[in-house]
Image (cartoon, rainbow, N blue to C red):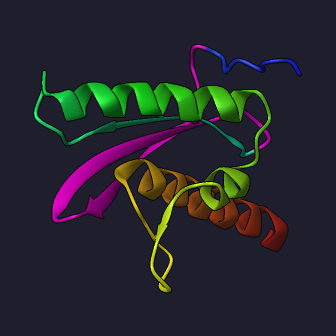
Amino acid sequence: MTRTRLPNRRLNETLELMFNDTRYAVTVGYYPGINCIGEVFTHGAKVGSNMDAILDDACVALSMLLQYGVEPAGLAAGMGRLGDAGAPASIIGALADLVAGKADDRMAAVGAS
């Protein structure tokens, strides 16, 4: 398996994510020309806090998995869930759900054009 890095300049989009009454700004970066997500970053935890460090590391891990070819839907499916409703058990699962949903939206838009 080979890692496909993103170019230094690339299309990105910043979205809002609410999880457990906390608002996060999530930025996803796209591979040029193919509309696939290759990276994710987030901010919303107090700077310098343990949660800030956990989110930084989680975003690096999610981004690396995407760059090694793991499908966003597969990432989301592998995350822990709460009860029958299937809500994400953690902010990391919520990030994976957001990335998977955004990937589905982009692919649907490409298919519709």
The number of numbered badges drawn on the structure is 0
Question: Picture coordinates of residue 78 (x, y %)?
Answer: 64, 55
Depth check: give the residue in front, 9 or 56: 56
**Residue 101: image x %, image y %?**
58, 64
The outermost residue toward the front is 83
Of all residues, the one furthest to the bottom in this rendering is 84
Q: Is residue 32 left or right of residue 42?
A: right
Name the spot of residue 40 as percent of width and height, x first.
Answer: 49, 37
Locate residue 92, reporting x and y percent: 43, 47
* Viewer can see residue 55: yes
Is residue 104 one of those drawn in magenta?
no
Q: Residue at x 29, y 46 (%)?
A: 25
In the displayed orientation, state which residue is furthest to the top.
8
In terms of depth relative to the viewer, which is nearer, 77 or 110? 77
Q: Is residue 12 magenta?
A: yes
- Magenta residues: mostly which secondary structure? strand
Judge whether 13 appears above or below 65 on screen.
below
Q: Nearer the viewer, residue 28 or 68?
A: 68
| Position of the C terminus by quadrant | bottom right
**Region rendered in magenta:** 8-34
Question: Does residue 31 show up?
Answer: no
Q: Horizontally, is 67 left or right of 80 in the view? A: right
Above/below status of 40 relative to 60: below
Q: In the picture provided, is 26 more to the left or to the right than 50?
A: right
Is 89 on the left or on the right of 108, as rendered?
left
